[in-house]
Amino acid sequence: MIWVAEKQTSFFHKNIPDNAITHLIAEERGTFLCEGRLFRPVEIQEKGKTLWVDLHACARAPQYLGMETTGKVRIRVEGDFEDLFQGDTIRLKSSFRLPHDFQNPGSFRSTLYLRSVGVDALGFVSEGKWIARLPASQRQGWQQSLENLRSRVRASVSTKLSFPASAFILSQLTGERAGLGSLWEEAFRKAGVSHILSISGLHVTMIALIFLFLFRLLVVGPIFSRSLFILKIYPLAVILPVWFYVALASFPVSAVRAGMMATLLLVGLFVWKKLDTLAALALAAILILAVSPLSLFSVSFQLSFMAVLFLIIFFPRWQTFKKRFPTLPRPFGWFCDSLAVSVITLVGTAPLLFYHFHALGLVGILSNLVIVPLVNLGMLPLGLLGVATGFWAPAGWCADLALRCVSWFSLHSEWGIFYGAVSVWRIFLYYGALFILLCPISLVRRLGLSAACLILFFWGGKMPSHGELKITFVDVGQGDSAVVQLPDGKVWVIDGGGIKGSDWDIGRFVVAPFLWEEGIHKIDALFLSHPHHDHYKGLTFLVEKFHPKILYTNGDNAPQSEDMEWVEFLKVVEKEHLDVVRVTNQTKSLEESGVHLQFLAPGPQGTVSHFDTNDNSIVMKLTFGKIKFLFPGDLMELGETMLLERKPDLKADVLKLGHHGSETSTEESFLEAVQPQYAIVSAGAYNSYGVPDQIILDRLYRRGIAIFRTDRQGAITVVTDGESLSIKTFVP
C-alpha cells in the first residue's frame, strides 16, 4: 500500500486518490488554506487545542488556487477560537507535514497509530484567528444532541466539583482526559493504572454489567416477571446504554471495539443463553480487522484482546483450583479473585508492555486491586447518575479517593518498575511457553518445552562482544546523541538530545528504548558537549535509570532561557552522585580496551566567557586501531578557527558535523584539516532551522565525502574492528 507518494508502504492495500493531501505535501512544510468537517470533538490540551478535520478543499500558498482535496488531518492549535463541535464545517490556514517517527530500534511507531485512526497528515495553526466556522455547517441531529449533552455535562461537573476530581470524572464520561494535565497523566502511568484514563473494554464491560444487573432486577419484579418474552429479550436492551456511553465518549476506537464485543455477547445471551466466549472474542477481532486492518498493530487492540484471551483461558482454571479450599471466607475469596485477575492480565500483557512501552510495573498489581473497583464500581456508575440528575457529590467523593490512591501508588512505584525491551520473535516464544502448558501431552514434555522457550526468551539472542567498536548516532530529532559500545562491552553516551520547552522526554522515549533494544542497562560514562537543551535534556532519564559513574562537561551553564530545565538536570546529577569532570584539552585521555579518547577543546584555560556556548563545545577524537572519529559538538566558525590555531591532529575517517550541518560550521579549512571519508548529520526531519544547509552539503559533495543523515536514514551505526569499518542505517 502506498500511503505517501514514493515514500511509505504498508502490508495493506489502500488506493490514494490524486487529490489526497499526502500528494500535496512535499518533503518540506507547506502552508494551506483549507476547508473541512470536524470528524471528532475538539480536544482541549494543556497548551492549545487539537482539531481532527476531514478535508474537502485546500489551496496552497502563495497562489491559494483552490482544489478539491481528500484526507484526514490532526491539527494542533495555539490560542483561543470560537467554540467548535463535531460535525462543524470550518475554514483554516495551517501548515502541514507528513507524520514522521524517530527512526531507531525500539522507537514507538506513531505513524502506524495515526494510520490506524485514518490520519494522513499533521497540521499546526499558530493563532486561533486563522480558524472560522462556516455558516453552512450542517451537523447531524444526533451529533448536535450528543455535543449539547457533553457541553451540559462539562459545565455541570466543572461548576459543582473542583479540579482534579472534575477533570477525572470527565475523562471517564466524555473521554476528555487532557484536562487532567501531564502531571496527573504521569502519576497514573507510574501507579500502573494509566489504562483507566482511556475509555476501553474495562469501562464498557462495567457499563454492560451494571445495566444487565439493573435490567435483571427489573424483569424479575412483579410487573414484567410474567412475560417470557421480556425475560428473554432483556439482554438486548443493555446494548442501548452500552452504545450511548460509547457515543458520549466520542466513539474512541478502543471503546468501539469493546462495544462490538459486548454487543456480540449480549446477542449471544439472547439467542443461545450460553455463549462460547472464545468464539465471541475471535468474531469481534475478525469484524474489527475487516473494517480496520491496521488495528492489528494498535497497542490498545493488542493489549485488550490479549488480556481478555488470558482471562477467558486461565481464570476458570483459577476458579477450579480455588474450589480445593472450600473453607475460605467469602470476602477473602473475592480478594483472591481480584488479585488473580490482576496477575493473569499482567502475565498476559507483559511482553506487549515491554515491546511498546519498555516498562513493566509490578505495583500495578496492587494499585489495580484498589483503584479499578473504586473507579468502575463507584465513580463510573455514580457519574452516570450525575449525568441523569445533575447530583455530582457522590461521584466527586469517589474521584477524590481514587486520585489520592493514584498519588500514593505513584510515589511508591519505583521499587516495582522494570525497564527493558523484547523483540517480536521473543514475544512468540513467551506466549508459546505459556500455551504449551495447556497442550494434551505429558507433564514432563510440557515443562521441558516451556522451559526451553523461556530460556530462549530471556537470552534474547544477545551475543558477547567480538572485540569490535560500535558507535550509533541515534535519531533524536533536532539534537545530538551518540552511543559508543566499546569492545569489552562498556558503554559511553555522548549527548542525549532534547526538546526545548517540552515535557516530552527524549531520553525516556527515544534514547533509552534504543539502549534497551541493544541489551544495555548500564552506562559507564556520559559526555555533554555543551549545555543546550537539544544535548542535555535527554540525559536526565539516563542519569536516573542507567547509573553512570561520571559526567564530562565543558563547565558552562545553560543559557538563561533554559535556567529551570538546566537546574533540574543538575539536581538529578547531584542526587545520583555522579562525578562531574570539567574538560579542557589538558584533561587526561581515556583508554579502554584499545579505544583512545582524546579531548581537543576547550583550550587549556577552559571555556571562554564571551563565547557562544556552541563554540565552547567539547571536541573529542576517538581512535580504535587505524579508524578515527571526530565529535566537534556544535562548534561554529569561531570555535573551529580557535581549534585550528592550536594545530592538533584532527584527521578522522568519520566526522560528526558540527551544529547539525548549519552553514555556521564545517568551514573549508576545517574540512581540510579533518579530511573525513564519511560525514554524519544529526538533524530533525522538517526542522525549522533549514539544516543541514545546502551550502554545507555541496561542500561535502565536492570533496567526495559520503553523507549520512539521521533525519532521512534514522539511526546510523558504524562498526569497526580497527582496520576497516562498515555503516548501517535504520532506514535503508
Image: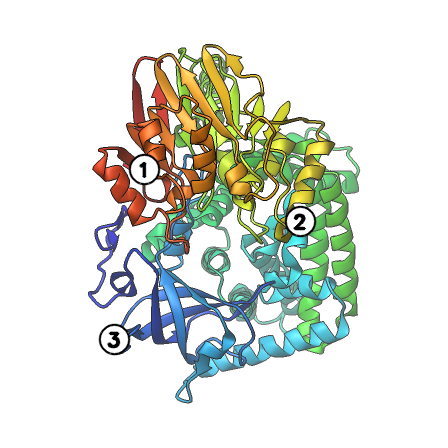
**Label 2: element kind:** helix
Please state the total of marks drawn on the protein image.
3
Residue 222 locus on image (x, y percent):
69, 72
Q: Judge by depth and name the residue closer to the eye, 188 or 454.
A: 188
Numbered mark located on residue 668 in the image: 1
**Label 1: element kind:** helix
47 with respect to 428 (left or right): right
Which callout, 3 or 2, points at the residue further toward the start of the chain? 3
| Residue density around tag 3, few if under 14, some if 14–19, many if 20 or more, within 10 Å | some
The mark closer to the camera, 3 or 2, is 2
Residue 708 locus on image (x, y percent):
31, 36
> What residue is pinned by disc 3?
68
Q: Judge by depth and name the residue closer to the eye, 180 or 145.
A: 180
Q: Is residue 235 above or below residue 581?
A: below
The amino acid type of the residue labelled 3 equals: Glu
Spatial CA distance of label 3 from label 1 is: 49 Å
The amino acid type of the residue labelled 1 equals: Glu
> What residue is pinned by disc 2?
563
Spatial CA distance of label 3 from label 2 is: 48 Å
Residue 618 locus on image (x, y percent):
52, 31
Which callout, 1 or 2, points at the residue further toward the start of the chain? 2
The figure's colour scheme reads rainbow
Numbered mark located on residue 378 in the image: none
Q: Are marks 3 and 1 in contact (CB under 8 Å)?
A: no
Q: Is residue 391 above or below residue 425?
A: below
The outermost residue toward the front is 645
Which callout, 3 or 1, points at the residue further toward the start of the chain? 3
The image quarter containing residue 221 is bottom right
Residue depicted at 69% across the width and 43% down the height:
567
Residue depicted at 60% across the width and 77% down the height:
151
Q: Is residue 128 above or below residue 196?
A: below
Residue 335 locus on image (x, y percent):
73, 40
